[in-house]
Amino acid sequence: MKLSPKAMPRVEHYAETAAESACHLADTAAPESWSPAAADDALDAIDTLAGALSALGPDLAAALAPVAAATANARRQLGLGDDKGTAATVEVPGLRRSAQRSRRRGLGPGFKGIRMDG
């Protein structure tokens, strides 16, 4: 699939923000600084980004399919379970896979975080 030379409104901005956030997280986090919630959020972000890119076509979806298996394996190794005890099935043409998905898909347009003065 050929990508457009110009991204849709806000797509490039959000992709850049995600990349910058990932770099800040990698620079900040040490092995002892992770909590179960933080690790689960990071794995959810990986799944969400891979899912968004998978929409570009079946070949890319097939190439990214191992990401869901890897994050599911990471969750098992970290003892992070799905609170519902079920896994969602994601259909990709010519490919079947299952991945644990959070019900949360984002905080909405314009979310700037929670400010705590103090």
Image (cartoon, rainbow, N blue to C red):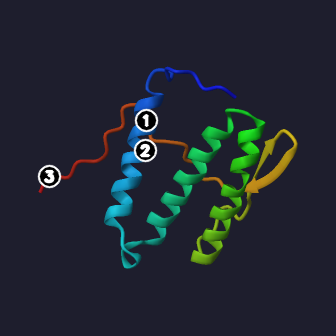
Mark 2 is on which residue type?
Ala
Between the C-alphas of marks 3 and 1, the distance is: 26 Å
Residue 102: x percent and y percent?
60, 53
From this view, report whether residue 11 is shown above or below residue 98: above
Mark 1 is on which residue type?
Tyr
**Residue 18, labelled with which disc?**
2
From this view, report whether residue 39 is shown above or below residue 104: below
Residue 40: x percent and y percent?
52, 63
Tag 3 residue: 117
Q: Are marks 1 and 2 in contact (CB under 8 Å)?
A: yes
Q: Quadrant of the C terminus?
A: bottom left
Which quadrant of the figure has residue 27? bottom left
Q: Are marks 3 and 1 in contact (CB under 8 Å)?
A: no
Please report whichever mark, 3 or 2, sits nearer to the chain's N-terminal start.
2
Q: Nearer the viewer, mark 3 or mark 1?
A: 1
Work out whether residue 59 or residue 34 is closer to the camera in this orientation and state it: 59
Work out whether residue 89 or residue 96 is closer to the camera in this orientation and state it: 96
Identify which residue is drawn at 38% across, 41% down: 17
